[in-house]
Amino acid sequence: MLTRQVDSRMKALNPIPISYLVQTANQFVCDIYVKSDKGRANVKRYDEMKSLNILGLLTFYFKGSDENEAEDRIHRILWQDSRR
């Protein structure tokens, strides 16, 4: 299992639509969850993501055969413009 913590209040974090994050997560076989101080959501389920407060410190959990690829892709979409 891989975990990655991100602070969504950081300016380097790109605001992205929840639907894009959900669509990206569904491209992978592994389980992907995100936890905030207000709860936990399956990143592959739009209804769960929509109800989660995604401001503040977030912890993403990746578990499965393609967890490395999923973690890399989620990381890249969250910070896609930060290296420019």
Image (cartoon, rainbow, N blue to C red):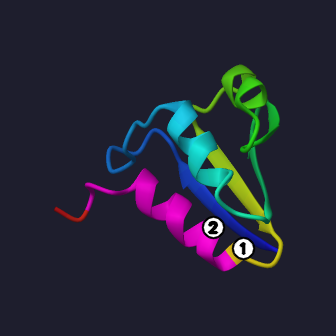
Q: Name the residue under label 2.
A: 70
Q: Is residue 36 toward the left or the right of residue 75 in the image?
A: right
Look at 68% across and 51% down and name the residue there.
Answer: 26
Q: Which mark is residue 67?
A: 1
Against 44, residue 72 (above or below) is below
Q: Is 78 or 27 nearer to us in this picture?
A: 27
Q: Residue 9 carries which label?
A: none
The magenta region covers 68-82
Look at 53% across and 48% down and name the residue there.
Answer: 7
Q: Three-letter amino acid code at disc 2?
A: Ala
- Residue lying furthest left in this view? 84
Look at 40% across and 36% down and name the residue there.
Answer: 15
Any magenta on residue 75? yes
For the C terminus, which image quadrant? bottom left
- Which quarter of the picture shows residue 53? top right
Q: Three-letter amino acid code at disc 1?
A: Glu
Q: Is 43 or 82 nearer to us in this picture?
A: 43
Marks 1 and 2 close (CB-CB < 8 Å)? yes
